[in-house]
Amino acid sequence: MRKLLLQPWAKPVLFVLCALPLAWLVAGAALDRLGANPAEALIRGLGDWTLRFLCLTLAVTPLRVRTATPQLARFRRMLGLFTFFYGVLHLLAYAWLDKGFDVGEVARDIAKRPFILVGFLALVLMAPLAATSWNRAIKALGAARWQKLHKLVYAVAVLAILHFLWMRSGKRLYGEVWVYGSIVALLLGERLLRAFSARKAAPAGSRWAQAAIKKEAARAPRPQTISPVVSPASDSR
């Protein structure tokens, strides 16, 4: 399995798999197979896949750590970029099919309807993450700043679930909300648990290291004194 993840064709295969949902939605719209309200089906379909790709992106690190498969890390960037890609398409489909690209109408809808506002905020927060997902950005920002910036993905996840919850609350359809909410809660909870465990283990490890250093220092032979007489030159130092 690990060797397969390192194959040169692994990323192209993942790219095709990530593009398939879009192809399916576009084909469904072209062939009039998206139901009685194809515009709504297309908008919501793109939103659903944004949330699914977000869950997949968040799952990479826990799976990598729990299964000791570092090769999974090479796919996280692509999954994150597809999350942003589908999110942008979700917004564009809403602005086009629901508002006719009327910027004023879109702005009023964002200001008036909370679930659209939090969804828009989630997409805004994803923008700098997508823009800085390249190696040059990591070098330019520095690893520490880059990691702090990319912790925004946790806020994105919370806002995305809130957007989904408010959107479904109008029709009282909470089944999928519970599913995605549980997945996101599990993935974020795993990160918090891992961070807490690392912080808790750090002091004990440092104390053990200090004790080991002192023990080695006690075992080391003491330097012998060559002469009990201190010269004026050495005393002046």
Image (cartoon, rainbow, N blue to C red):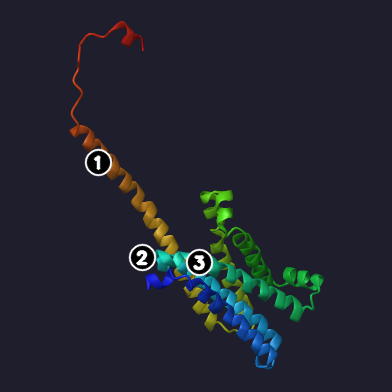
Which quadrant holds the N terminus?
bottom left
Q: Earlier in the sequence, mark 1 or mark 3?
A: 3
Which quadrant holds the C terminus?
top left
The Cα atoms of the two marked residues, 2 and 3, are separated by 15 Å
Q: Nearer the viewer, residue 219 or 227?
A: 227
Mark 2 touches mark 1? (CB < 8 Å):
no
Labelled disc at residue 212: 1
Instruction: Say few, some or many: other residues with alpha carbon within 10 Å of mark 3 (under 14 / 14 to 19 / 20 or more).
Output: some
The structure residue drawn at horizontal position 60% and vertical position 58%, both measured from the top left corner, is 132
Disc 1 or disc 3, which is closer to the eye?
3
Left or right of 7 in this view: 36: right
- Amino acid at circle 1: Ala
Instruction: Say few, some or many: other residues with alpha carbon within 10 Å of mark 2 (under 14 / 14 to 19 / 20 or more).
Output: few
Give the answer, above or below, for where 76 lies relative to 225: below
Task: Report helix, strand or loop for mark 3.
Answer: helix
The structure residue drawn at horizontal position 20% and vertical position 15%, both measured from the top left corner, is 226
Q: Earlier in the sequence, mark 2 or mark 3?
A: 2
Labelled disc at residue 44: none
- Amino acid at circle 2: Ala
Q: Which residue is mark 2?
A: 68
Residue 150: x and y, percent?
A: 55, 58
The structure residue drawn at horizontal position 81% and vertical position 70%, both measured from the top left corner, is 104
Q: Nearer the viewer, residue 204 or 175?
A: 204
Residue 10: x and y, percent?
A: 47, 73
Labelled disc at residue 76: 3
Q: Earlier in the sequence, mark 2 or mark 1?
A: 2
Give the answer, above or below, for where 226 lies relative to 59: above
